[in-house]
Amino acid sequence: DVEVYFEEPPTTDRHGRWVWAHWAEKGSWSGESCGRSPQFTPLDVSGHTRFMLEEVDGEQKIVQQVVYRTFSDWELALQ
């Protein structure tokens, strides 16, 4: 049960090729997932995604993507 929202509105570089989006997720781990029982711990994850756009066949396509983010207790339990 998670809400995802932008911490900052998505922006582009001055050439419009790279897009940056700062986002966050808030909620709780309330259901079984990947065989792990819920711990009902808060999910508080944030990060930023950047991607490069190029025109391919007349449409903008993502050609490169980078994601930096924190991890939830659920994700750490899978390691």
Image (cartoon, helix red, strand yellow):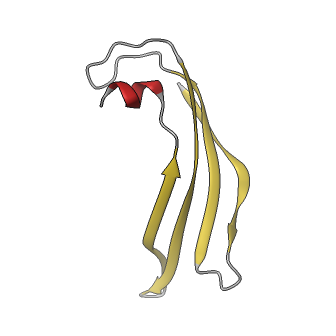
Asked if residue 55 is positioned above or below residue 11 in the image, the reply reads below
Residue at point 48%, 20% (across, down): 29
Q: Position of residue 67 (x, y in %)?
A: 48, 56
Image-based side of 20 in relation to 60, left or right: right
Spot occupied by residue 63 in the image (x, y as percentages of width and height) = 42, 75
Quadrant of the frame with the C terminus: top left
Which residue is drawn at the image coordinates 46% and 76% (left, top)?
61
Vertical placement of 66 versus 46: above or below?
below
Q: Which residue corresponds to the image point at 44% horizontal and 12% vertical from the top-left?
A: 39
Along the horizontal axis of the image, is 12 left or right of 32?
A: right
Q: Measuring 45% from the left and 25% from the top, which residue is drawn there? A: 73
Residue 60 image position (x, y, % from top left): 51, 78
Residue 56 vs residue 50, the one in the foreground = 50
Does 38 appear above or below 26?
above
Residue 4: % across, % down: 60, 39
Residue 10 appears in which quarter of the rendering? Answer: bottom right
